[in-house]
Image (cartoon, rainbow, N blue to C red):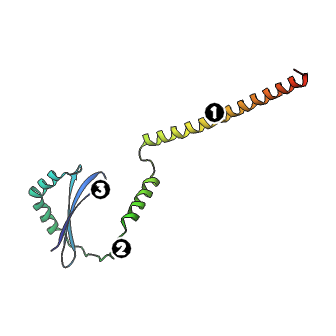
Amino acid sequence: MPSTFSVFFDDPFWVGVLEIAGSGGVRAARHVFGGEPGNAELLAFVRQDFGRLLDAALAAPEVAAERRARQPRVSPKRLARQAAKEQTARPLSTAAEEALARAHQDAGHLNRAAAKRRAAQEAAERRAAARHRARERHRGR
């Protein structure tokens, strides 16, 4: 009987699942690790608790296994592009990140408004200076 043991993150815990494929279907059992297990912790688990997990999997009811169509292999470059796209498209996850982004955005708006005011003030000063020079030339000075 082929079997597989997979460890994955199932928010908020790390979980190990033992699957045993038989002629009629699949039997499974799971073990919750809690935090991310290191190599030493996995080795200790295999030595001490794997027998209980195996017994639990063999005692579990057999579920008919569906034959899934094999997914075609995706090239590493395509996977990298998809991962980069997901990273840029992901929303900010924490309130602190959102607050920082909002503050940065507001500062940008304030800086643009201040720059517009400065540019308008400088243009008004240039017009006033030009009018003053024109008046002085008209008076012959």
In the picture, which quadrant includes the N terminus?
bottom left
What label does residue 72 carry, if any? 2
**Tag 3 and tag 2, C-beta contact below 8 Å:** no
Q: Indicate the quadrant where residue 141 lies.
A: top right
Q: Is residue 65 above or below residue 84?
A: below
Label for residue 114?
A: 1
Q: Residue furthest bottom?
A: 23
Question: What number of labels is visible?
Answer: 3
Residue neighbourhood size for the residue with mark 1, other residues' Cα within 10 Å, grouped as few (<14), some (14–19), many (≥20): few
* Residue 10 numbered tag: 3
Q: Residue at x 55, y 36 (%)?
A: 107
SS at circle 1: helix
**Above or below: residue 44 compared with residue 99:** below
Marks 1 and 3, Cα distance to the nearest angstrom?
49 Å
Q: Which amino acid type corresponds to the residue marked 2 in the rendered image?
A: Pro
- Mark 2 is surrounded, within 10 Å at the Cα level, by few (under 14), some (14 to 19) or many (20 or more) other residues, namely few
Q: Which residue shows up at 37% across the image and 68% down it?
A: 75
**Front one among 66 and 42:** 42
First in residue order: circle 1 vs circle 3: 3
Residue 32, which numbered label? none
Q: Position of residue 83 (x, y in %)?
A: 40, 58
Amino acid on which disc 1 is placed: Ala
Secondary structure under the numbered disc 2 in the rendered image: loop
Q: Position of residue 121 (x, y in %)?
A: 71, 30
Question: Going by the image, does 123 lie left or right of 61?
Answer: right
> Which of pointers 1 and 3 indicates the residue nearer the eye?
1
Task: Examine the image and state in which quarter residue 139 appears.
Answer: top right
Q: Is residue 6 left or right of residue 118?
A: left
Quick one: label 2 or label 1, which is nearer the N terminus?
2
Q: Amino acid at mark 3?
A: Asp
Residue lying at the far front in this picture: please name it. Answer: 141
Mark in the foreground, 3 or 2: 2
